[in-house]
Image: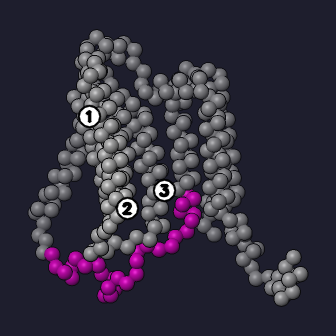
Amino acid sequence: MTFFYSETIKIFILFLFSIFLGSVIILLSYSFSTSIPDTEKVSAYECGFDPYEDARNVFDVKFYLIAILFIAFDLEAIYFFPWCSCAGNINIEGFWCLFDFILELIIGLLYAWEMGSFSWN
Amino acid sequence: MSFYLSEIFSFIIIFLSFFIVFSTSPIYAILFLILIFCSSGFFLFFFNFDFFGLIFIIIYVGAIAVLFLFIIMMLNIKIKKDSFVKNDNYFISGITLFIFSLIVGIALGICLEFFIYDNYLEFFINNQSNLLYFIDYLSNITVFGQYFYNFFNLFFVLAGIILLVALIGAVSLTLDSSHSDAISLKQLEAKQLSKSANILSYI
């Protein structure tokens, strides 16, 4: 057992325990509940009619744009964590290049804001 | 124990990739892909790459899988109960299956050779090497940060520029300014009246 595993084995035990607890709850609620399946109960119900339309509809492209913006800012946020963990041990260029990174992030954010990608009009 | 767990996770990843390829519905394929991302994150975790394992889960499951889900929503999928996939073209499917099994076999062979013939296991069992972890232990995120920001800070700035270009490209592709502009949606009488059969009025 290395030092790494001796620290992270607690997380693994918690993970196994959560899987165990979730499966126990699902199995108990499945086995102890009274379920009498019926064709009218199981079938999909839409105001008394059979569902005649597909659930997939045309949606706005702005949902997709929000997802792409989330990816960009998510990647930019992930770069902050290693910098913060060792800010005292890196040289002056590495220290200031994060500020340039933040500047580029602010430019992108202002551009997206100015183009109106956050508004739904 | 952790060594065998990493082996188990590698086999789980291979089996889930089989499920992705042979599942008929693309929705189930996406769900198996998300399971692959999670299990490869755990797989990296067992080789002390804790930061990269968590990044795998955050980026691929949290961000990239959302894009795949949008693509699934764009596809026009009708799942009927009695229409299974009838593949009459056995030649192409046979060749595809052969190539796929060849690739998987080669990968498995390389993995087994690595696991059997290397003295990798003895290095991990040896307690003297583990002493180094107790004396001087740097976490994965600290090592990555020191190495990346000391020696590759130019690439870091370049990555920022690439992300900015991607962001501007996504915004300018999806948001057409002529549609979002309120003036263009108005009915302009002079513009409509100016339209005639004369082709010179369009120029």
Residue found farthest to the top:
B128
Identify the residue at image location x=67%, y=35%: A100
> In the rendered image, which residue does mark 2 sit on?
B26
x%, y% of residue A93?
A: 66, 24
In this view, the mark in front (3 or 1): 1
Q: Have a look at marks 2 and 3 and say if they share a chain.
A: yes
Query: Can residue B114 be spotted in the picture?
Result: yes
x%, y% of residue A50?
A: 32, 85
Position of B8 relative to A46 (above/below)? above
Side of A77 relative to B131 (left or right)? right
Is residue B182 covered in magenta?
Answer: no
Identify the residue at image location x=53%, y=49%: A71
Position of B111 relative to A68 (above/below)? above
- The residue lying toward the viewer, choosing from A63 and B126, is B126
- Distance Cα–Cα, label 2 vs label 1: 28 Å
Q: Mark 3 lies on which chain?
A: B
Residue found farthest to the front:
B91
At mark 1, the secondary structure is: helix
- The residue lying toward the viewer, choosing from B88 and A95, is B88
- The residue lying toward the viewer, choosing from A25 and B37, is B37
Position of B151 relative to A49 (above/below)? above
Q: Mark 1 lies on which chain?
A: B
x%, y% of residue A96?
A: 66, 29
Residue B39 image label? none
Q: Give the range drawn in magenta.
A: A37-66
Is residue A38 covered in magenta?
Answer: yes
> In the rendered image, which residue does mark 1 sit on?
B7
Where's the C terminus of chain A, which quadrant?
bottom right
> In the rendered image, which residue does mark 3 sit on?
B67
Position of A48 relative to B56 (above/below)? below
Side of B140 relative to A13 (left or right)? right
Mark before the other along the chain sequence, 3 or 1: 1
